Image (tube, rainbow, N blue to C red):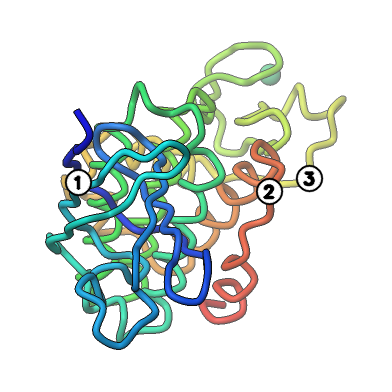
Amino acid sequence: MNNYVTEAINLKSYNLNDADKIIVMYSKENGLIKGVAKGIKKPKSKLGARMDLLVANTIQLLKGRSLDTIIQAQTINNFKKSREDFDKLMLSSYVSEIIINLGEGSENASEEIYSLLYKALNKIANSSNKKEMLIATIKFQLKILLIMGFCVELDSCLCCREQVLNENMYFSSKMGGIICEDCNEHLGVKLKMHYKIRDFLQAMLQFDFDFESDYDKKANEKVCQVCFNLLDEYIKTHTNKKQKSIKLIKENLA
Ligand SMILES: [Zn+2]
């Protein structure tokens, strides 16, 4: 088979020559893939805006010796509302950077990851306020970590393995979860976490992406921002890559 068809979301692009670009996409069937968009830099390109970043397409590719070529694309969703809103665009870029950084070697879970990425981009685009878009991003952060095997421990202390039932606990992004007050006397983790934040994160991790629980309704923007930062710290520690969009998000959502 020289041709194949897949659903894919455009994450990154770079120039190949004067006329062509290489598009990095996350595909439903094969995880991270690259394809050449021929003539995309010419005014009359037939692929046109379909090759813009953060567009989901059904694409047809022609297998090549080293690079595949995109021969057809039909847009499923261009997440239009994220193109007109700075915060939405930043969070969408953030989500796509995580996929680029973690995506290699994720082929086995590509359907699950594609679906999570699609839902997150769609929810961010259709959010009516910052709280909603942050919640979508937090759900994405927690669920992508779970899929990739870096799940955050929110139930038991990472040190003594006892369930943490006290009001206060600490969060270690290095260790990847919570530490009880007793153990922290030796460890000295600085980031204190209230059990309500823990419970909120647990709910965000456990419930279906689309399910809107009481936790979603009760949370406020500030709590969401705290959770977002905490998870971002953890992701940074474990991917060793800086998210370019994070600085802008922190400056603008603060
Ligand atoms: Zn402990």
Q: Rounded to the nearest whole Å, what is the CA distance between mark 3 and mark 2?
A: 23 Å
In front of the other: 113 or 209? 113
Q: Look at the numbered disc 1 and give the secondary structure of its residue.
A: strand
Q: Badge 2 is on which residue?
A: 241
**Quadrant of the image for the N terminus?**
top left
Residue 48 sits above or below residue 198 on the image: below
Where residue 104 sits: x, y (%)? 51, 34
Residue on which the image places disc 1: 7
How many labels sit on residues? 3
Q: Could you tell me which residue is drawn at 50 percent across and 63 percent down?
A: 225
The spot of residue 122 in percent (x, y) is 22, 61
Q: Earlier in the sequence, mark 3 or mark 2?
A: 3
Q: Is 117 left, or right, of 198 in this rendering?
A: left
Residue 152 placed where, x, y %?
A: 53, 30
Q: Which residue is mark 3?
A: 190
Which residue corresponds to the image point at 63% horizontal and 35% vertical from the top-left?
A: 169
